[in-house]
Image: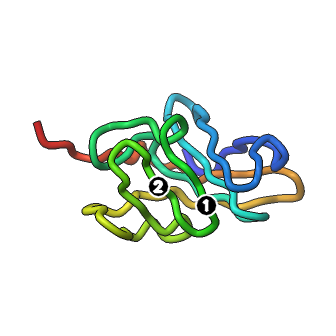
Amino acid sequence: MGWKKLCKTDEIGDRSLKEFDVDGVPVVVARVGDEFYAYPPLCPHQEERLAVSALCDGDMLTCTKHLWQWDVRTGEERGVAERPLLMYETRTEGDEVWVHVERELRYEYED
């Protein structure tokens, strides 16, 4: 797929998340200031939708279901989280947010 236009920068409020469909691939995007970060839409813990259950507070992303946390910029685990967030590369061009999707990133969940 490659680079795809995702949205306008003003479609996502600061310190918030929004889910998008990129040619059939679900992606959730967090905005912190003028930076945008994209992840698979589900928490790597128990498949909770991040756009519904996560909070973005500055540099920390928290899934409120079980309080797993990550560095919003790197996806690295914080607190009790046991897995990092997978990430898609993003860029801004003027007032547009672009995401690079070669394939859908998915977590493996235990049954």
Q: Amino acid at mark 1?
A: Asp
| 64, above or below 82, in the image | above
Query: What distance separates the C-alpha of mark 1 from that of mark 2?
Result: 8 Å
Secondary element at tag 2:
strand
Is residue 39 rendered to the left or right of residue 17?
Answer: left
Q: Between residues 3 and 63, which one lies in front from this camera angle?
A: 63
Residue 66: give its label: none
**Vertical placement of residue 98 versus 69, above or below:** above
- Name the spot of residue 47 as percent of width and height, x first: 32, 37
| Mark 2 neighbour density, 10 Å: few (under 14) some (14–19) many (20 or more) | many
Q: Residue at x 51, y 58 (%)?
A: 61
Residue drawn at point x = 77 percent, y = 48 percent: 13
Identity, as a three-letter code, of the amino acid under mark 2: Thr
Disc number placed over residue 57 in the picture, else none = 1
97 or 103: which is nearer to us? 97
Residue 81 spot, x, y in % from top left: 30, 62
